[in-house]
Amino acid sequence: MKKVFTFLLALLTVLGGCALAETAENNPLAEYALTSGVPVEIDLNGDGTIETLTYTAEMDETLGGEFARIEIGTAQGTTVGWNTQTLFMTSAYAVDIDGDGAVEVFICGDWASSDYATYCLHYLDHGDHGEIELLSFANADRGDENEGYNLYGYGYIQSVNGNELVLCGSQDVLGTYFGTRTFALVDGVFEFSDDGLWRFDTSDVDWEYRALTPTQEIAATFVDGDVQTEGAIEAGTRFVITASDKTSVAWFRTEDGREGFFSIAPDTERGWGMKVNGVSEEELFEMVPYAD
């Protein structure tokens, strides 16, 4: 369904019926992107009737902040709308991610201080009137307790892969890093669809400011392909965190390319931060790069 929908958008663009955000070769979301203030004619709920979808990024002069608004012109000749609260640098996308014929409309933006959120909207046609509903996401917020569901996904959309959605948001694990989780839409709810780890991009590491340098050795398991070897990260050896479940394990890569994992746990005595193999991060590292 995604390919069909993409073709429809491209065709409407040629005919002047809609416009998308400026295409960029390095933007994997360009084919799904909506342009602020430009209507798109599309069957949002798969019933064969065309609706008019408009995304608008607006400024609230009274509150001094930005927000995003979605308006849908219905088959009944009415309009239904929904808007975010304050949300900066918004973007919007439309894609039938689970292939059921109903198009998901996503709004992404920054609450503040690089804390991003993604909202997903469904259009419902009740015959005599239309309605917009918010879909729930498994809780992926910052912090070590990720239970339950929210009416947003924490993070911004990094990519759409088949029927899966990858969100990227900042997380705190021996420092603050942008990490990704993968979701799939199951029975109207976005559930985690991965191995339970937040994965952090370490492809372009600033070893001077992002790396952790232990002041004492850290017992760790080194992994080389299918081979696991017990050992230790030596004191003074710089490494970066590559993945973590934020509660029990952290994966790492040393500056010389060795990879593996070690045990972590929330520092309940301190009230925040982590312990590594029972040792407080304050004692263990020269510096821990947390951000507000």
Image: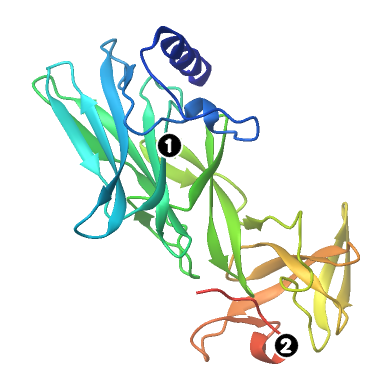
Q: Nearer the viewer, residue 25 or 162?
A: 25
Q: Amino acid at mark 1?
A: Val
What distance separates the C-alpha of mark 2 from that of mark 1? 42 Å
**In what element is the residue under mark 1?**
strand
- Image position of 193 with respect to 254: above or below: above
Q: Quadrant of residue 58?
A: top left
In the rendered view, does 170 fall on the left or right side of 120? right
Residue 5 appearing in the image: yes
**Residue at image location 50% in from the left, 13% down from the top:** 7
In the rendered view, does 199 fall on the left or right side of 157? right
User: Residue 116's spot in the image, x, y percent?
Assistant: 45, 55
Residue 153 appearing in the image: no
In the rendered view, does 131 fall on the left or right side of 86? left
Residue 186 got which mark?
1
Q: Nearer the viewer, residue 5 or 16?
A: 16
Name the residue that disc number 2 marks. 284
- Image position of 148 with respect to 34: above or below: below
